[in-house]
Image (spheres, coloured by chain):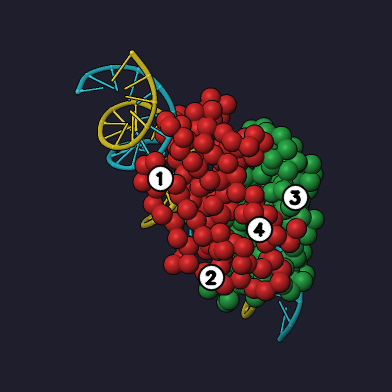
Chain colours: A red, B green, C cyan, D yellow
Amino acid sequence: MTVNTKVVPMAQHKTITVDADVVACCSPIASVEMSEAEASDIAQIFSALSDPVRLRMLSMIASESQVCSCALEGPLAKSQPTISHHTRILAEAGLIIGERRGRWMWWRVAPERLGAIARILGG
Amino acid sequence: MTVNTKVVPMAQHKTITVDADVVACCSPIASVEMSEAEASDIAQIFSALSDPVRLRMLSMIASESQVCSCALEGPLAKSQPTISHHTRILAEAGLIIGERRGRWMWWRVAPERLGAIARILGG
DNA sequence: CGCGTGCATCGATGACTGTCAATACTAAAG
DNA sequence: CTTTAGTATTGACAGTCATCGATGCACGCG
């Protein structure tokens, strides 16, 4: 992660914010050769997508419009700390956005960012 | 990796072949919730994309139409075994296709597969 | 206030990964 | 056949990651 990317370390009950331009700026993979910095930034996003549990999480969150953390634990068959770990990684990659409502944490996808990544792949 | 995916273990001077339908079949991430098997297959592909060196490799191969293994070692500043390791992972993920010509190994991208992945992300 | 609940963090652990030196393999050239 | 050059494989090592129990923190309720 370079200085361009502002990831606020997630204090409790606060929302992770990510600079979406990091990806929005980048060109399709075939157009120009990638710099080391670009490659590192993009790799972090693909890294967030490289785990089966996180992919299923993202799929669940994208299918419904809002999903509570508590609703992920059961279907994914993972412990609560593990769920929290994965939501954090997806959020730090800018793929989902969290909002605290009362005792519950609600997640939704960041569709622009998914589109930006798709564009990098030349879609 | 499930039984659906046929990855021929790479014997020397032979070409890695991958069943491209594994991804071509799959729906956008928001349409239906992903099965465990689907998630594992797709995660393997994103895993191949989650390394900066491999991303730059893919970018170089996509920029030119054909690239020799020997032409990657210098610009990427990695040892020959490391280059071979990364090309193998990209090939096993079906992202690049290798062909031996004489003593040289030439790589090209598999554009349909990049498009299929982009489509999964909702592009 | 005290209690219960949902989530985040810490610490530990087993598994995986990127890297390279050494080595084996293959194909062309002498 | 011997040599040379490009690539693949092996083995080892350090770093990273997924997972979960234990614990801490924040919120709402009685």
Q: Which mark is residue A116?
A: 4
Gap between marks 2 and 1 measured at Cα: 31 Å
Of badges 2 and 1, the one in the foreground is 1
Dot 3: within a 10 Å radius of its alpha carbon, few (fewer than 14), some, or many (20 or more) residues? many
Q: Which residue is mark 1?
A: A14
Of badges 3 and 2, the one in the foreground is 3
> Is any atom of residue A69 visible in this view?
yes
Which chain's residue wears label 2? A
Task: Give above or below for B15 relative to B105.
Answer: above
Q: Which residue is mark 3?
A: B119
Which is nearer the eye, B91 or B23? B23
Which badge, 4 or 2, comes first in the chain's sequence?
2
Determine whether label 3 and label 2 are within 8 Å by CB. no
Gap between marks 4 and 2 measured at Cα: 19 Å
Q: Quadrant of residue B52?
A: bottom right
Which is nearer the eye, B16 or C27? B16
Image side of residue A1 versus residue B16, left or right:
left
Of badges 4 and 3, the one in the foreground is 4
Q: Quadrant of residue D14?
A: bottom left
Q: Secondary structure at mark 1?
A: loop
Amino acid on which the number 4 mark rests in the picture: Ala
Q: Position of residue B73 (x, y in %)?
A: 59, 73
Dot 2: within a 10 Å radius of its alpha carbon, few (fewer than 14), some, or many (20 or more) residues? few
